Image: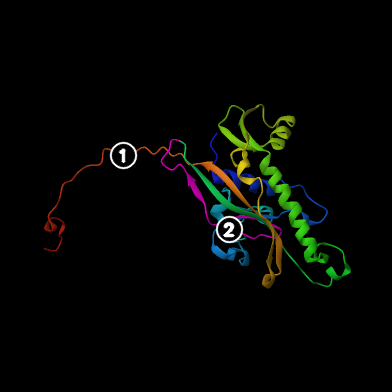
Amino acid sequence: MTIQLPDIYAALRDSVRFYPAQELKCNQPQTWRVLQRSGAVEISTQNLGATVCDKDKPFFWSRLWHEKQYNPNAITWAFPLLYAAEVDSNVMVDPFGGAPKFIYNVQVGVLDVWSDDPDGRKCVGCNARTINEIYFDTQTVLQSCLKYLEYTRGYSIDSGPDVWANADFVAQALAAQRIVSANFKAPSILTASQALNREAPFFRVERSAEKIYGTAINLRFATSGCVTPEWNFTETDFGVLAQEAGCKTC
């Protein structure tokens, strides 16, 4: 099975979708977004830069929007936010060889918002957390989502096409008889990336002007670079026309 970056994004999106409910809402990621503009300016918008066309794509998912039944007029989101963003120095390995591959440098992180309100001063609930607590909460969520990604593997489900799916998801679907069979096709979606991430930069994120804080890690993902275009060799040669041939007002 080949791996493309959207496959990795889809697994991270599903880690948010299927993240178990927590006693505190701030301990469960509410939104997934692949940021697409420098400076992450989407974070300051109501819809995170998403449109209704993002509904079935791997680049955006919002629990709040899901609860609104994907109303196209109510594309909204909430923190905590699991995000990914490409950073500099992506490379293509062996571009003219028989098995080229892309290596993407991707920052993956979890952000949450710090609040200082009367309810929070009672030292109870999400708004009572200090910035240090937000750092550790976002770290736990990030690690859990990466674990979901690690256990995403290749399967052929019910004799259908090969897909990437989380091993626990497949096991539960088999137990509940939602699917009949799941044939193992490939190990972890991160197999080709393991050697690239023996050590990965891990750091805190601070956007103090917006009271946004979190935890992020820089990872390298190896994906297939093979393409098989079908070239069109039947293009008609019309020769060379004189300038006057196309003139409508001569």
Q: Is residue 231 visible?
A: yes
Q: Label 1 amino acid?
A: Asn
Who's the residue at 59% across and 52% down the image?
A: 106
Q: Is residue 101 left or right of residue 44?
A: left
Q: Position of residue 55 (x, y in %)?
A: 58, 51
Q: Main secondary structure of the magenta part?
A: loop
Q: Quadrant of the C terminus?
A: bottom left
Q: Label 2 amino acid?
A: Leu
Distance of label 2 from label 1 (alpha carbons): 36 Å
Who's the residue at 47% across and 36% down the image?
A: 99
Q: Nearer the viewer, residue 188 or 16?
A: 188
Q: Earlier in the sequence, mark 2 or mark 1?
A: 2
Is residue 206 positioned above or below 89 on the image?
Answer: below
Q: Answer whether residue 66 is magenta in the image.
A: no
Who's the residue at 84% across and 62% down the image?
A: 125
Q: Which mark is residue 35?
A: 2
Applied colour scheme = rainbow
Q: Is residue 32 left or right of residue 233?
A: right
Secondary structure of residue under mark 2: loop
Is residue 42 positioned above or below 235 on the image?
Answer: below
Q: Answer whether residue 90 is magenta in the image.
A: yes
CB under 8 Å between discs 2 and 1 = no
Residue 179 figure quarter: top right
Check disc 1 and report the residue beneath it.
Answer: 232
Q: Position of residue 226 (x, y in %)?
A: 46, 39
Q: Position of residue 202 (x, y in %)?
A: 68, 55
What's drawn in magenta, residue-wise? 75-98
Q: Nearer the viewer, residue 204 or 29?
A: 204
Q: Is residue 32 visible?
A: no
